Image (cartoon, grey):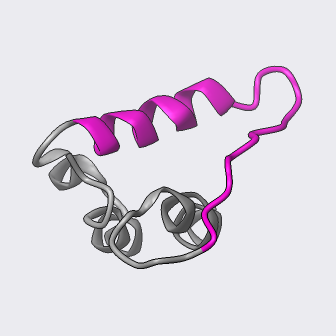
């Protein structure tokens, strides 16, 4: 999951490097925590210093690109 967050989600949401950014479509069965995942990503993108709350070091390091 960390690879998907780092390589797909954060890579598409960053604005620092010019890339061919696309939209994101999160697909999964009922009860697979899609809304929880998007809530975390939204909180990181919206709030300053929110990366401090991310427990997985690889994701926290990459999430700095979209923080705030």
Location of the N terminus (image quadrant): bottom right
Taking the spot 66% from the left edge, 30% from the top edge, the residue there is: 33
Lateral position of residue 1 relative to residue 29, left or right: left
Q: Position of residue 7 (x, y in %)?
A: 59, 73
Q: Position of residue 23 (x, y in %)?
A: 67, 48
Taking the spot 30% from the left edge, 66% from the top edge, the residue there is: 65
Lateral position of residue 21 relative to residue 32, left or right: left
- Residue range of the region highlighted in magenta in the rendering: 20-46
Q: Position of residue 43 (x, y in %)?
A: 32, 34
Q: Nearer the viewer, residue 19 or 24?
A: 19
Taking the spot 34% from the left edge, 62% from the top edge, the residue there is: 63
In this view, which residue lies farthest toward the top? Answer: 30
Vertical arrangement, residue 36 with respect to residue 15, above or below: above
Q: Nearer the viewer, residue 63 or 15?
A: 15
The answer to if 30 sits in the magenta stretch is yes
Vertical arrangement, residue 35 with respect to residue 5, above or below: above
Lateral position of residue 36 relative to residue 63, left or right: right
The answer to if 66 sits in the magenta stretch is no
In this view, which residue lies farthest toward the left? Answer: 49
Q: Nearer the viewer, residue 24 or 52?
A: 24
Q: Position of residue 15 (x, y in %)?
A: 38, 64
Residue 52's quadrant in the figure?
bottom left
Taking the spot 19% from the left edge, 37% from the top edge, the residue there is: 47
């Amino acid at each position: 999951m960390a690879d998907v967050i780092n390589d797909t989600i954060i890579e598409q949401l960053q604005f620092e490097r010019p890339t061919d950014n696309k939209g994101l479509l999160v697909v999964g069965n009922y009860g697979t925590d899609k809304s929880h995942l998007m809530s975390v990503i939204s909180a990181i993108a919206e709030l300053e210093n929110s990366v401090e709350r991310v427990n997985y070091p690889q994701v926290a390091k990459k999430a700095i690109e979209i923080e705030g």
